[in-house]
Image (cartoon, grey):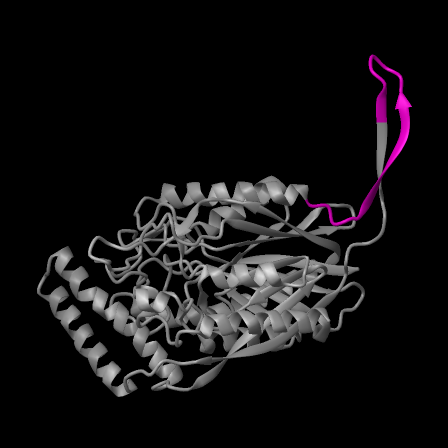
């Protein structure tokens, strides 16, 4: 038997905080809150074993990116408060573009609020995990799948042959909705894990409000229909975008999030973690003879709990020296500030802002990988909850990576995620490199072929845990 508990804490940042999700935006600070940002925690342990070293904590955090610095702070805070080892924690983030953005920002107004907010995530995470531990009850688990079409391949080609970020109806897309259920021994829902691949970019450059984008309504919808606590685990969304996005209309993300939430709730309500067998009890004489059946427990659900940390050795692109990239970024940022100070038009501000955003991404990679040109280990984490594998890698993976791992996994169910346990940029499939586009430019520090290697290393890790 397993045992689990959940909790949620509010991490909504203050109005006015730098709101830097888009290079094409003209505003600087958030002007309001449409929906709170939260941290949702799930703690799982073998039933009856309260040893912190045996517990696993999964965190679902409403933020765009958590680089290694903040990831480590969160783990340390959780370990200090609860004793759960850092290696036994999964620190996931939804990737919403409608909240604060970590570091290297070209935004000035409200920038002083960003670092304190990110620092607050560590004690907030510890609080959520502590509360989840206090609510632990025996549970059974199982998973199921559904289908939802709020996502689409986001790499179309323009009339002049350039790949841009939009809607590509003929491109690869993963519409699968994977759901893991944790019920108490009376069949009441304790937790629901929802795994889906789509960039939370429904709210775009014109949006001036803090929101979790569609993952917020997903959780809200599942909880209102099913009960219990819902965690959203972002999938392999590197080349997956929303069917309607880049808007300032908050009703759009709420509608699409509700659509996905309804499908997840439908799947959740079909999952019964208790193995059952059908028995015909009697044939009751009536207007028609009625078969009366019972569905009795025929065993226990899989109560295996495990975790493995592995890695993929991936080739890194050659990049300019950090000093050169920093100088370029400083010059671009200075130009942006001059445009703002002289009262430039909205269009002039946007034209000055988007190069800053792109140079920010390249600067992040040079700080992490130096000038590249060699191979680096990128972490892989696999958690086993019963018959289900939860795979997490710290990149923005193309959907083909997730689909390949799910299809070839030895687990009955495999929930594949990027956006967890740090951040190292985009991981595109090899075919995408000659096509070009945002996901293979300064956002991707990896050489072609790295994604295909990651697939094999993820499968090897799952097999090790299952074997």
Given residues 32 and 217, the one toward you in this image is: 217
| Image quadrant occupied by the C terminus | bottom right
| Horizontal arrangement in the rendering, residue 306 relative to residue 356 (left or right) | right
- Residue 354 vs 325, above or below: the answer is above
- Image location of residue 248, percent across then percent down: 30, 47
Q: Residue at x 71, y 50 (%)?
A: 183
Write down the quadrant of residue 101 in the picture. bottom left
| Horizontal arrangement in the rendering, residue 400 relative to residue 250 (left or right) | right
| Horizontal arrangement in the rendering, residue 304 relative to residue 298 (left or right) | left
- Image location of residue 277, percent across then percent down: 84, 42
Given residues 160 and 312, the one toward you in this image is: 160
Q: Is residue 159 magenta?
A: no
Q: Is residue 289 magenta?
A: yes
Q: Residue at x 36, y 86 (%)?
A: 370
Q: Residue at x 74, y 50 (%)?
A: 273
- Residue 439 vs 424, above or below: the answer is above
Number of callouts: 0
Q: Residue furthest right?
A: 282
Q: Which residues are magenta?
A: 271-291
Q: Residue at x 57, y 71 (%)?
A: 458
- Image location of residue 79, percent across then percent down: 61, 76
Write down the quadrant of residue 320 in the picture. bottom left
| Image quadrant occupied by the N terminus | bottom right
| Horizontal arrangement in the rendering, residue 343 relative to residue 214 (left or right) | left
On the question of residue 372 being in view, the answer is: yes
């Amino acid at each position: 038997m397993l045992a689990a508990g959940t909790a949620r804490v509010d991490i909504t940042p203050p109005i006015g905080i730098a709101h830097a999700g888009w290079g094409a935006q003209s505003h600087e600070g958030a002007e309001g809150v449409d929906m709170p940002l939260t941290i949702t925690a799930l703690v799982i342990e073998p039933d009856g074993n309260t040893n912190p070293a045996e517990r696993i904590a999964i965190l679902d955090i409403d933020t765009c990116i958590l680089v290694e610095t903040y990831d480590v702070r969160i783990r340390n805070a959780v370990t200090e408060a609860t004793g759960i080892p850092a290696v036994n924690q999964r620190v996931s983030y939804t990737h919403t573009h409608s909240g604060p953005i970590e570091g290297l920002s070209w935004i000035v107004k409200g920038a002083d609020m960003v670092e304190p907010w990110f620092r607050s995530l560590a004690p907030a995470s510890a609080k959520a995990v502590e509360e989840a531990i206090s609510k632990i009850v025996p549970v059974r688990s199982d998973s199921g799948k559904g289908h939802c079409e709020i996502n689409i391949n986001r790499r179309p080609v323009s009339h002049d042959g350039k790949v841009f970020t939009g809607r590509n109806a003929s491109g690869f897309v993963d519409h699968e909705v994977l759901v893991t259920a944790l019920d108490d021994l009376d069949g009441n829902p304790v937790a629901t894990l929802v795994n889906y691949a789509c960039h939370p970019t429904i709210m775009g450059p014109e949006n001036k409000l803090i929101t979790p984008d569609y993952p917020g309504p997903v959780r809200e919808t599942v909880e209102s229909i099913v009960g219990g606590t819902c965690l959203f685990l972002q999938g392999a969304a590197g080349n997956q975008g929303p069917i309607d996005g880049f808007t300032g209309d908050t009703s759009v993300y709420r509608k699409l999030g509700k659509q996905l939430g309804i499908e997840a709730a439908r799947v959740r309500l079909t999952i019964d973690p208790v193995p059952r067998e059908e028995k015909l009890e009697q044939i009751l004489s009536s207007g028609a003879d009625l078969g009366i059946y019972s569905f009795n427990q025929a065993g226990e659900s899989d109560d295996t709990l495990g975790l493995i940390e592995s890695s993929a050795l991936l080739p890194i692109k050659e990049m300019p020296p950090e000093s050169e990239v920093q100088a370029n970024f400083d010059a671009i940022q200075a130009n942006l500030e001059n445009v703002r100070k002289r009262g430039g038009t909205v269009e002039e501000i946007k034209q000055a802002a988007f190069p800053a955003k792109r140079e920010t991404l390249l600067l992040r990679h040079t700080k992490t990988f130096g000038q590249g040109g060699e191979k680096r280990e990128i972490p892989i984490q696999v958690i086993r909850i019963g018959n289900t594998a939860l795979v997490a890698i710290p990149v923005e993976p193309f959907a083909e990576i997730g689909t390949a791992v799910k299809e070839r996994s030895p687990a009955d169910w495999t929930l594949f995620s990027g956006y967890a346990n740090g951040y190292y940029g985009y991981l595109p499939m090899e075919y995408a490199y000659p096509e070009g586009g945002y996901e293979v430019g300064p956002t991707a520090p990896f050489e072609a072929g790295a994604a295909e290697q990651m697939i094999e290393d993820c499968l090897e890790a799952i097999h090790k845990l299952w074997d």
